Image (spheres, helix red, strand yellow):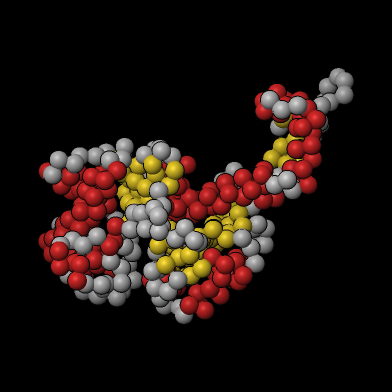
Amino acid sequence: MLSQPQLAQITGLSLPTVIAAVERLERQHLLEAAKAQRGAGRPARTVRITPVANAVLGIDLGGSSVRAALFDLHGARLRELETISLYSFSKLSRAAALDHLREVTQHFPEARRVGICAPGIVTPFDALERSWLFGLKTLERRTVERLLGLPVILENDARSAAWGELRRGRGTDNFALMIFAFGIGAGIVASGRLLRGARGAAGELSYLPPTLSGFSTKPRMGALAYGFFEALKAASPDPNAPNWEAEIFHAAARGQKRAASAVQKAVEHLALAVAGIIAVIDPERIVLREEFPHTKELVLEPLRLMLERVGLPAPLEISSLGRDAGLIGIALLCAETLERELLEQP
């Protein structure tokens, strides 16, 4: 809590300017009057931020299930909801998938803005492209806003996770967060800012070809990611079963030779992506989201050895936020955008 004279002192603004700004922010419900302090003399009027009155909704489509959570402007989680598996969501028609997002949003009537993170390329023109969740067809932000009746932010799942890790985890002003659950991607933070690229494709490592022949193939998830999952499928008795990848990693950890060989080949594909990131931007560290069981021993340690072999050692760490990184990141992006807009309004 701060009094108006204290705000004037901190900001360097005149007291009348501060009083006018406080009144405007109160009308926008960004500030509220605090309880008067007891003591001698007339107490100075104090105010405090009212973050719950400007709650934002984060929806994460980059994990194993559809998850949503309401956050206040400080990034504190208020309520959350988990619905269907992402596999089930991907089988919905485009119309049904959008209806599901609408139903999820209706569980949080307090939300003033919605952030959605998903696999795919998010262009500077606010459209989600080449996402397998929506049949590889472009999903425009305006379409989602009309459906939900709220302002919407669209962001790539890896970039959202990187922002969450930067704000609340092990991220630094120059780092990359790697994901490899439904493709291979990186959220890149350079000088404290998300790197999106001219067309929104920065970090889409799935499309790197593992060999020259990769330029002649067009798998829907990208050549490098296709090779990663094909390597794992070679050891799976049923690659259509739920969580089949996790079973491969469990088997490899138990010493099952076929599974261990499959995981090793998959990690070699991931190493190509990591080496590319290091060679291009040379980040302070690379953080891996723990996508599958035993990631530290089966992915992190082998990656370190491979990179050292080619002369590209880099600090590698496991994400401290895990699967929460994307949900936290998209909510924080939403909250920061809303707060900035509120403060800039005349």
Farthest-out residue, front: 198
Q: Which part of the image, by quadrant, shows the N terminus?
A: top right
Report how many numbered discs are placed on residues in the image: 0
Residue 322 visible in the shown view: no
152 relative to 189, above or below = below
> Residue at the location (15% across, 62% down)?
211
Residue 188, given in percent of the width and then of the height, sits at 37, 47
From this view, report whether residue 282 is shown above or below residue 276. Answer: above
Residue 121, quarter of the rendered image: bottom left
Q: Residue at x 41, y 57 (%)?
A: 200
Quadrant location of residue 259? bottom left
Relative to 89, does residue 167 appear above or below in the rendering? above
Q: Position of residue 13 (x, y in %)?
A: 71, 28
Left or right relative to 89: residue 53: right
Say whether residue 141 is visible: yes
**Nearest the camera: 232 or 145?**
145
x, y (%) of residue 96? 51, 78
Where does the image place residue 175, in percent across and percent down from the top left?
35, 42
Name which residue lies at 74% across and 43% down.
Answer: 25
Quadrant of the image containing the C terminus: top right
User: Which residue corresponds to the image point at 15% horizontal and 64% vertical from the top-left?
Assistant: 212
Q: Is residue 241 positioned above or below 304 on the image?
A: below
